[in-house]
Amino acid sequence: MIVIEGMDNSGKSTLARKLAEHIGLVIQESEGPPRSPEEMNERVDHYQSLGNYLFVRHPCVSEAIYGPRIRGINCITPGRTMLFYEAQPLLIYCDAGNRGMIGHERLAHDTDEHMAGLERDYAEILTLYRLWAAEHAHLIYRIGDDMDEFCATAAFQFHYRAS
């Protein structure tokens, strides 16, 4: 499993398409904010059953960062988060740099609540992502990095971890 994480507008989907093509994995795009705590935990269970997928965001990471700031709660149960990290996915962090939300394309699941919370708490969420990356990320991608070189490095890491 590969998980690409980072702020909105940090290049996750673009990197995922290139990396999936390079490695030959299926992409599971983010399904957005939880519709309910039960739905979010069911989503985590489903994701864990998929195996070799490339995830653009995984709830065990993004919900822990966005949930408490935007909705006041992290919906994911601690046991599910523990199992996620024990599975040792390859974790890639996309850093938004100083880009902010300029050029962000609003997705269908980007609710008004999410967008308002993102605007209100952008700097805090970015800091929390960077702290998460310092502790957990195996690779860091920045917009402007050589994508072919990055994908080759990620592919090596992915195959090395699988052997």
Image (spheres, rainbow, N blue to C red):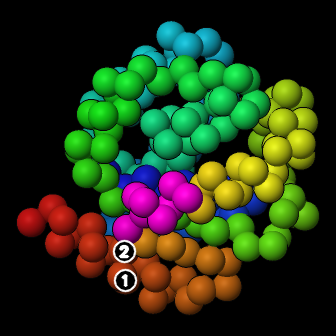
User: Quick check: is 126 in the magenta stretch?
Assistant: no
**In this rendering, would 141 be left or right of 11?**
left
Q: Position of residue 123 (x, y in %)?
A: 80, 55
**Rendered residue at 90%/64% (across/down):** 102
Quick one: SS at disc 2? helix
Give the residues in magenta: 131-138
Q: Which residue type does callout 1 highlight?
A: Ala
Tell me the residue that label 2 is attached to: 154
Report the number of discs. Answer: 2
Q: Position of residue 84 (x, y in %)?
A: 32, 38
**Rendered residue at 48%/65% (across/down):** 134
Q: Position of residue 7 (x, y in %)?
A: 68, 55
Q: Residue 48, relative to residue 125: is it above or below? A: above
Q: Residues within 10 Å of mark 1 (few under 14, many from 20)?
A: some
Q: Which mark is residue 82?
A: none
Of residues 104 and 41, the one nearer the viewer is: 41
Q: Position of residue 144 (x, y in %)?
A: 67, 85
**In this rendering, would 45 be left or right of 73?**
left
**Mark 2 touching mark 1, by CB under 8 A?**
yes
State the image quarter where residue 139 is shown. bottom left
Tell me the residue that label 1 is attached to: 152
Residue 25 appears anywhere in the view: no
Q: Residues within 10 Å of mark 2 (few under 14, many from 20)?
A: many
How far apart marks 2 and 1 lie (CA) works out to 5 Å
Quick one: SS at disc 1? helix
**Rendered residue at 37%/68% (across/down):** 138
**Rendered residue at 20%/69% (across/down):** 159
Q: Residue 22, relative to residue 40: is it above or below? A: below
